Amino acid sequence: MKELQFKTNINCGGCVSKVTPVLNATEGVCEWNVDTANPGKVLTIKTDSLSEQEVIATIAKAGFKAEALGE
């Protein structure tokens, strides 16, 4: 299991509710959360199979931007 972190533009509860069904339906996502209090709106995803690019594409499908945070 790895943990991936992304800077996003998911900045409020309404945004989180739009992204929730998309992330929950994505195979390979074990657990996730968005820290909307953080200035970077950091999305943390625990996954056993997804790559950063796949997560970024999934977030884009929900209508948001995500960029990988370096280790």
Image (cartoon, helix red, strand yellow):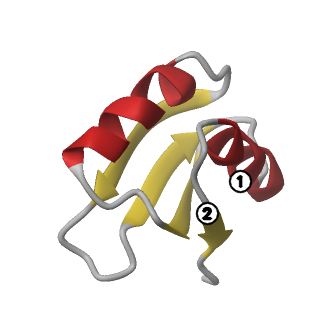
Q: Residue 7: x and y, percent?
A: 51, 72
Q: Where is residue 62, by image quadrant?
A: top right
Tell me, for residue 22, which label it has, or none: none
The residue tagged with tag 1: helix, strand or loop? helix
Q: Residue at x 75, y 36 (%)?
A: 49
- Looking at numbered disc 2 in the image, what kind of residue is underneath it? Ala
Q: Is residue 69 above or below residue 21?
A: below
Percent x, y of residue 41: 36, 69
- Residue marked by disc 1: 56
Q: Is residue 43 left or right of residue 66?
A: left
Q: Quadrant of residue 26?
A: top right
Q: Quadrant of the C terminus?
A: bottom right
Identify residue for label 2: 66
Question: 46 or 14: nearer the eye?
Answer: 14
Query: Residues under labels 1 and 2: Cα distance?
Result: 5 Å
Residue 9, position as x, y percentages in the image: 46, 65
- Looking at the picture, which amino acid does disc 1 mark? Ile
- Indicate the quadrant containing the N terminus: top left, top right, bottom left or bottom right: top right
Say above or below: 70 vs 16.
below
Label count reads: 2
Q: Given contact means CB atoms under 8 Å apart, are the residues at marks 1 and 2 in contact?
A: yes
